[in-house]
Image: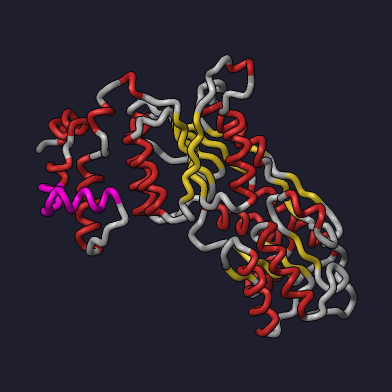
Amino acid sequence: MTGDEKEGTSMAVTLAEVAAHAGVSPATVSRVLNGGYPVAGGTRTRVERAVEELGYVANAPARALAAATSDLVGVLVHDVADSYFGILAGALQGALGPETPARSGSGRLAVVCNTQGTPAAELAYLTLLEGQRAGGVVLTGGAVEEVEHTVALTTRVARLASAGTPVVLCGRPPLTVPDGLPVATVVFDDHGGAFRLAEHLLALGHRRIAYVAGPAGLSTSRERLAGHRAALERFDPAVAEECDTLTVHAGFERSAGYDATRALLRRGESFTAVVAANDTVATGIVAALREQGIRIPEDVSVAGFDDLPFCVDTAPPLTTVRVPLREAGILAAQLVTGRRQPPPDGITTLATELMVRGSTAPPAAGRQP
């Protein structure tokens, strides 16, 4: 099949054609697409590759009906139980819903898809939403920065956009989509926020600053760590190099902060401040320090990122960087429904704000953990 022929028939690709392309039975293709059935890894890979190459989408006949686009908006989150995503998705859903009289019944049904941050789940949900002729798709949270996944993600986003489905990226980097297809992007100034937080600690007199970064290979982790290190580098390259030995990658959950801090203490590292990849990680850091009798901020300062609601209620209140999650959710809803047009380059950057509270103070003379 030539490229032109494939392009002309991709909207009518059948399950049987996918099976022939992958060298398996139609039943096997169905099992892979439906999930919940045991399929050998190599077979699953062949089927998924065939689906990708042929551009097959379940419920393909519905795609041929231009009027079949639904009022459903898919919202992909890493973990809806995480306050970061809960706030973002809640604001987005509220802005899409039918409650506002001014929208005159034009509300949309937001369906939250929990990916657990896995590339495979992200791609699978996009395929399902394409098959449902979703009226819009919003992808939230950091992007997994793997070439293979980026290529597959771009292909799916391009298919959605080419079929007329608005796509918004929220809290992640832009994608270079072929043919100039419109994909709006809302990004947070994570780099700038991390830079200002590190500057704050340096101004207080801290020179040995531990950093519990997020997972390696995630765009959010990269941006926040880059901003943190840029501030250290500008202040003194020697300080930046010394602090590199105090940087560890971990998850975004509380236990990650606890375990990483325990590991730093077991190594006998000296530090006067710890910066967390997010506020949830910071709570684990605080627990690990207090377990060892280390006072906050008298002995060690602790700072987070995101400014989740609990930050003002911790003891002491947590110094952090505010990320405008509610504003981002509302903006994403406006963009995905066409109530607001993106700027010419498609990218809207939302500012972050340093929130100085009681968990940071000048380092105590002679006190090291």
Picture quarter with the C terminus: bottom right
Res. 239 image quadrant:
bottom right
Q: Is residue 369 left or right of residue 230?
A: right
In magenta stretch: residue 192: no
Residue 287 percent location from the top left of the image: 74, 71
Q: On screen, 160 above or below 41?
A: above
Q: Is residue 64 left or right of residue 315?
A: left
Q: Is residue 68 left or right of residue 242?
A: left
Q: Is residue 333 left or right of residue 360?
A: left
Residue 208 percent location from the top left of the image: 75, 72
Characterize the magenta stretch by its predominant secondary structure.
Answer: helix
Res. 170 image quadrant:
top right
Snapshot colouring: secondary structure
The residue at the point 51 percent across, 63 percent down is 216
Residue 327 percent location from the top left of the image: 66, 35
The residue at the point 44 percent across, 41 percent down is 175
Q: Nearer the viewer, residue 97 or 234?
A: 97
Q: On screen, 226 above or below 298?
A: above
Q: Which residues are magenta?
A: 19-34
Picture quarter with the N terminus: top left
